[in-house]
Each structure stands twice: as structure tokens, then as C-alpha cells.
């Protein structure tokens, strides 16, 4: 079964330092491409996170987001604290100013509270982070497995579409295979009629006609291309339906390139309207398959 490169998974857990949440999102990419988003204090884990992800994901653009909601931290650590030294300094400055300018009234609390920096509010992000790495690893794996489940489901739908396209190609190829010898007979009769019309009542050189037909048959022969295309088609189907332990997206991509090459050659050598119509239909299916394979791991 093939697997899509599009998926999303998440996992979260309440810990002593707050709510840890991990999201893993993937989209198609030729290689493994990782974007890591972690809060301050988790930078040292980034190399390990990449290794954990590589155990499950072979290719695709991966966006890994780790967030930490520290709202559950002890409220004592986030209550505002009075900076007494600054408050005393501001009071002394105001007293000195009042005396020198001979101002009426005493310095009181209403004057001091206008200086906001006499209060310190603890930044939760500055509280040291101390969390068991195994928790992050476990949550990462849970999120990745959820993402893989979505990729597997999408892979089933992709495989159904690919199998239908391959069946369509097989049907068109069967018609081309049957039509190929028929068109040679028709071309021979057409050539013979043309020669008779040109030579009027003169006898036809059957040997010369046979040589010309042999040359045309060799020039228009598409049997080798049909055999190779059918072989690629069968290998593609086998690779698609077998239980694959390794990603097959790139391998299938190479196969579809070879199939496209054979189809183009058949179209160039066909010299037959009915075969040309079938070749166009096959090329449409091949192009659709190629587009779908861009999202197959």
C-alpha cells in the first residue's frame, strides 16, 4: 500500500511546567525537508527531534511545532514584585526636586505609582524549563503516528485512483495492440490501389511492392514499444499493490517516465488515426498518474 505525503497529527500533555503540545504537518517534497518551531529553552532538542522524525518519515516537507502553555505554573512565580530600590530612588528624586523648586505638598504614593518600572512582572518564558526529554519524544511519536494514519488513509484513495488509471491505460493499449497489424494490411491495400491507379493497365511488380511494404512495416512497427510499455505497466501494478515496507514514490516516478517515453514513440510511429486517439488518451492517464505521484512517499 502506498502512502500520501500529506498529513497532520498532534499530541499534548499537561506537565509540571505547563501544557506541552506538539503538531506535525507534512506536504509533498522531493526530499526530507524539516521546519522546526520550538519555544525558547528547547533549542538543544532540535537535533534529537529531527532524528526521531527521520525514523518515521522518508521524504516530504515536515513542519514540526512545539508549544508550551505555562499558564498552569505556580501563580507565585508570575505575581508582580516591587522593586523597592527603584521606588526609594524615585521618592528621593521627587523630594529633592520639590525642595529645590520650592513646591508645595509632599511626595505621596500617587506620584510614585506613575513610574511603572518600580514593579517587576515575572516573564513565564524566563522561568527555567526542566522537562523529561522522554516526554517530548513520546509526544512527538504520538503526533507522528497520528499523521501517518492520515497519510495512510489518503494513500488508499490515491491508490484507487492510480489503479483506475492503470486499468484505463491497459484497455487502450489492448486496442493499440490489436489495431497495429490491421493498419499494416490496410496500408498495403491502399498502397497497392494507389500503384494500380498510377500505372493504369501496366502490370504490378509484386516483388517491388512487397519490398516497399516491408520497408513501411519496419518503419511503422510498434510491437517492441507495446511490449515494453506493457512490461512497465505490469511492473508498476505489482509495485503498487504489493505490501511495501519501503517508500516507492520515487521508483514509481521513474517507471512513469519510461512509460511516457514508450507512449510518445508509439504515437510518433503509429501513422493511424485510431491509434493516435488511443495514444492521446493514454498520455492523459500517464500525466494524471505523474501528478498523483508527486504526493506519494
Image (cartoon, rainbow, N blue to C red):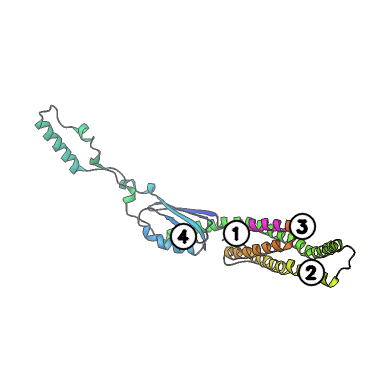
Q: Are marks 4 and 2 in contact (CB under 8 Å)?
A: no
Residue drawn at (76%, 57%), measured in percent from left and top? 273
* Neighbourhood count class around disc 1 (C-alpha, 10 Å): few under 14, some 14–19, many 20 upward: many
- Residue depth check, mark 4 versus mark 3: number of the one nearer the observer: 3
Which mark lies nearer to you, 4 or 2?
Answer: 2
Q: How far apart are marks 3 and 2 (CA)?
A: 23 Å
Q: Is residue 160 visible?
A: no
Q: Nearer the viewer, residue 105 or 63?
A: 63
Point out the tag, 3 or 2, that comes first from the N-terminus.
Answer: 2
Q: In which quarter of the image is the N terminus?
A: bottom right
Q: Which of marks 2 and 1 is nearer the N terminus?
A: 2
- What segment carries the magenta color? 278-295
Point 19% across, 42% down: residue: 86
Residue 273 visible in the current orientation: yes
Determine whether label 2 and label 1 are within 8 Å by CB: no
For numbered disc 1, what is the local secondary structure? Answer: helix
Q: Name the residue under label 3.
A: 274
Looking at the image, residue 70 lies above or below residue 231 = above
Q: Which of marks 1 and 3 is in front?
A: 3
Q: Nearer the viewer, mark 3 or mark 2?
A: 2
Q: Is residue 67 left or right of residue 5?
A: left
User: Secondary structure under badge 2?
Assistant: helix
Where residue 145 appears, as percent x and y from the top left, is 53, 59
What is the x, y in percent for residue 245?
Answer: 58, 67
Q: Name the mark on residue 138.
A: 4
Q: Quadrant of residue 239?
A: bottom right
- Between the residue at mark 2 and the residue at mark 1, the CA separation in whole angstroms equals 44 Å
Residue to which mark 1 is pinned: 293
The residue that label 2 is drawn on is 212
Decide which of 92, 273 is in the foreground and name it. 273
Q: Which residue is drawn at 12% across and 33% down?
A: 97
Residue situated furthest top in the rendering: 104
Amino acid at each position: 500500500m502506498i502512502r500520501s505525503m500529506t498529513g497532520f497529527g498532534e499530541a499534548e500533555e499537561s506537565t509540571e511546567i505547563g501544557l506541552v503540545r506538539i503538531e506535525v504537518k507534512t506536504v509533498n517534497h522531493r526530499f526530507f525537508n524539516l521546519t522546526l518551531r520550538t519555544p525558547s529553552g528547547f533549542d538543544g532538542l532540535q537535533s534529537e527531534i529531527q532524528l526521531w522524525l527521520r525514523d518515521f518519515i522518508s521524504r516530504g516537507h515536515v513542519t514540526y511545532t512545539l508549544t508550551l502553555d505555562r499558564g498552569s505554573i505556580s501563580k507565585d512565580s508570575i505575581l508582580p514584585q516591587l522593586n523597592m530600590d527603584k521606588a526609594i530612588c524615585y521618592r528621593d528624586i521627587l523630594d529633592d526636586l520639590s525642595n529645590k523648586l520650592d513646591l508645595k505638598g509632599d511626595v505621596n504614593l500617587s506620584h510614585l505609582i506613575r513610574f511603572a518600572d518600580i514593579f517587576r512582572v515575572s516573564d513565564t518564558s524566563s522561568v527555567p524549563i526542566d522537562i523529561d526529554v522522554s516526554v517530548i519524544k513520546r509526544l512527538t511519536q504520538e503526533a507522528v503516528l497520528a499523521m501517518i494514519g492520515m497519510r495512510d488513509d489518503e494513500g488508499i484513495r490515491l491508490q484507487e485512483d492510480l489503479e483506475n488509471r492503470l486499468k484505463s491505460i491497459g484497455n487502450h493499449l489492448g486496442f493499440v495492440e490489436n489495431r497495429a497489424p490491421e493498419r499494416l494490411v490496410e496500408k498495403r491495400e491502399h498502397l497497392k490501389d494507389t500503384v494500380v491507379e498510377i500505372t493504369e493497365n501496366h502490370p504490378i511488380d509484386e516483388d517491388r511492392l512487397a519490398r516497399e511494404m516491408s520497408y513501411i512495416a519496419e518503419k511503422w512497427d510498434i510491437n517492441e514499444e507495446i511490449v515494453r510499455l506493457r512490461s512497465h505497466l505490469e511492473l508498476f501494478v505489482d509495485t503498487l499493490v504489493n505490501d511495501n515496507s519501503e517508500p516507492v514514490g520515487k521508483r514509481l516516478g521513474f517507471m512513469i517516465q519510461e512509460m511516457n517515453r514508450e507512449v510518445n514513440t508509439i504515437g510518433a510511429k503509429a501513422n493511424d488515426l485510431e491509434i493516435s486517439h488511443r495514444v492521446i488518451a493514454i498520455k492523459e492517464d500517464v500525466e494524471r498518474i505523474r501528478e498523483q505521484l508527486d504526493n506519494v512517499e
